[in-house]
């Protein structure tokens, strides 16, 4: 048997194409029927409990250093102790809004802010004139 070394081998890819077309047809038929489902357990909410809005606490400091908290007057001296006692009647989740006269010393406003934080309030805002 003599081999002709000049001949190049041929690769027959027809069976490969046939197999790939059959697999593609199977995938096209099955793919629309595949459903991915993830079960999620949601917490049960209470339908009887209504969300109530917590009224904010307004603190105003005027140029004479008079402090007014929700229409109640306080003196600057002893504000920290008096506000701590007053804050026991309030909800600690309420937002505190501090507005001060622009002529006041920065340290006074920061001492009021420290007293509010020490009383247990976490949401404190400083008001600006816009």
Image (cartoon, grey):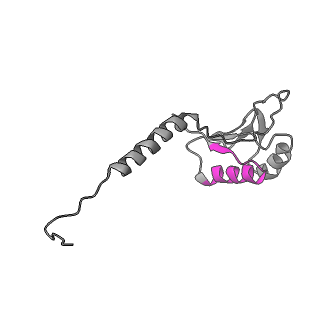
Quadrant of image for the N terminus: bottom left
Residue 35 at x, y = what percent?
A: 61, 37
Residue 19 vs 3, above or below: the answer is above
- Residue 68 falls in image quadrant: top right
In this rendering, would 96 be left or right of 11? right
Which residue is the extreme one toward the front?
1
Which residue is the extreme one toward the left?
6
Q: Residue 99 or 50: which is nearer the viewer? A: 50
Residue 52 at x, y = what percent?
A: 78, 30
Residue 129 appears anywhere in the view? no
Residue drawn at (86%, 40%) of the image: 89
Q: Residue 89 or 74: which is nearer the viewer? A: 89
Q: Quick check: is 122 in the magenta stretch?
A: yes
Residue 116 at x, y = what percent?
A: 73, 49
Residue 121 appears anywhere in the view? yes
Residue 21 at x, y = what percent?
A: 40, 42
Residue 55 vs 77, above or below: the answer is above
Magenta region: 107-125
Residue drawn at (59%, 46%) of the image: 104
Q: Residue 95 or 46: which is nearer the viewer? A: 46
């Amino acid at each position: 048997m003599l081999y002709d070394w000049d001949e190049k081998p041929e690769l027959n890819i027809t069976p490969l194409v046939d197999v790939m077309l059959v697999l593609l047809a199977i995938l096209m038929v099955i793919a629309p029927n595949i459903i991915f489902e993830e079960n999620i357990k949601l917490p049960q909410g209470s339908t009887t409990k209504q969300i109530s809005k917590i009224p904010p606490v307004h603190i105003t400091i005027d140029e004479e250093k008079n402090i007014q908290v929700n229409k109640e007057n306080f003196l600057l001296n002893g504000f920290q102790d008096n506000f701590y006692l007053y804050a026991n009647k309030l909800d600690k989740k309420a937002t505190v809004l501090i507005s001060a006269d622009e002529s006041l010393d920065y340290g006074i406003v920061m001492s009021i802010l420290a007293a509010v934080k020490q009383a247990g309030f976490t949401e404190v805002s400083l008001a600006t004139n816009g």
